[in-house]
Image (spheres, rainbow, N blue to C red):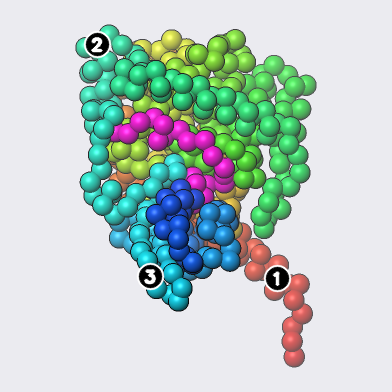
Amino acid sequence: MESLKELYRIGLGPSSSHTMGPRFAAEQFASRFSQADTYQVTLYGSLAATGKGHLTDQALYEVFGREKLNVIWEPDHSLPQHPNGMKFKAFSSPDVLLGEQIYFSVGGGSIRTPQDIVLHSETVYPHKNLQEIMDHCVQRGITFWEYAADHEQDAVLDHLNSVWQAMKASVEKGLNARGVLPGSIGLGRKAWTYHQRTRSAADDMQETGLITAYALAVSEENAGGGTVVTAPTCGSCGVVPAVLFYMQKKKGLTDSDMVKALATAGVFGNVIKHNASISGAEVGCQGEVGSACAMAAAAVCQLLGGSLRQIEYAAEMGLEHHLGLTCDPVDGLVQIPCIERNACAATRALSMAQMSILSDGSHLISFDEVVSVMKLTGHDLPALYRETSVGGLAMIYRGKNASKTAIQTPCQS
């Protein structure tokens, strides 16, 4: 498994797979063919189907320049290795091909070439699943966060401290932002309103109100193209910071506590990424928000003093109860249902951690087994429910808009 630096990436929203990944691929390709006069990028599958709403073309233009780049959209054609495929070509005048490269954006901002997907190296963590990690931790008498620190040394803790500072900044900035989010549906920001109302609400509303406001704040920052952290993706970036921000405020915990919690969450996110997927285009939103809920539940359970088994149970519940969750963003934007879904998963993550703490950690279905089921379920989902904006809520919204247009347009005789 890879470094946690590959899982937690700080960058601009609104999508880790559709914005960050293509940008990283473009930067890599441009550095190889900086002498080119023009470039061509063909976007396939989900990248083409929802790329406009996810600002994929804008990310590419920022690297190559609008005058030098031709973007071709192929939503009905997916490359066999992954639904988020793209082909880059570099030309010299007059249209002489200098080179080309296929990349896949596999989730969380990570990119792969066809060779990388086949020959995936495990250079940082030697263990393949959570059971192997737990066995190692028991033998060594260490926790999950110490496991991460042992394999990545202090460098990973330094990185996670930067991640935590970026997460806090996204919460605080989002809480103070107001107005309408960019895009075609005219969705207004709600985090500030939720936060203000919660401050004057009864005590029994505080937990739900605050976690909701924090999750909305980060997700709205992402939807607005602001700076967020993939945890594990941009589309699910509000879950982990919302719950940890709440825990720090509520319990008076230190930044060091948060860094250790992020390390624990990262171990679980890494296992999911390695053995299944965190890409909505590949397995639906269960791979994004479901994974984020599992990560957050594990982190909070650790902060509550949970054992290895209790932490594993919390994460298992977080993922299990998001199985089958579809990815059907309205108009291809990371807004509906994505923003509210982050808030729902954040409140659920805290509940899962508390449920696990009340138990002895015993349960019949393991985290590893749920990960394998999630992968199978995701591959069984029809393509229209895997980040194509063709089915589900996206279809309903499109149908409503068509009806409004028909009513508003006078009949022609």
Spatial separation of the CA atoms under disc 1 and disc 2: 65 Å
Q: Which mark is residue 405?
A: 1
Q: Is residue 344 above or below residue 207?
A: below
Circle 1/circle 3 CB separation < 8 Å: no
Which residue has dot 2 on it?
A: 140
Where in the figure is residue 162, as x and y percent of width and height? 52, 25
Where in the figure is residue 291, as x and y percent of width and height? 42, 35
Instruction: Name which residue lies at 35% across and 59% down.
Output: 102
Q: Earlier in the sequence, mark 2 or mark 3?
A: 3
Which residue has dot 3 on it?
A: 97
Q: Is residue 252 above or below residue 379?
A: above
Please give the count of numbered marks on the rendered protein.
3
Q: Earlier in the sequence, mark 1 or mark 3?
A: 3
Q: Is residue 239 above or below residue 82?
A: above
**Amino acid under disc 3:** Leu
Q: Secondary structure at mark 1?
A: helix
Taking the magenta stretch, the answer to whether it contains residue 341 is no
Taking the magenta stretch, the answer to whether it contains residue 8 is yes
**Amino acid under disc 1:** Thr
Q: Is residue 201 left or right of residue 237?
A: right
Instruction: Name which residue lies at 47% across and 24% down.
Output: 160
Q: Earlier in the sequence, mark 1 or mark 2?
A: 2
Q: Which region is colored magenta?
A: 1-20
Where in the figure is residue 281, as x and y percent of width and height? 42, 52
Spatial separation of the CA atoms under disc 2 and disc 3: 55 Å
Q: Quadrant of residue 311?
A: top left
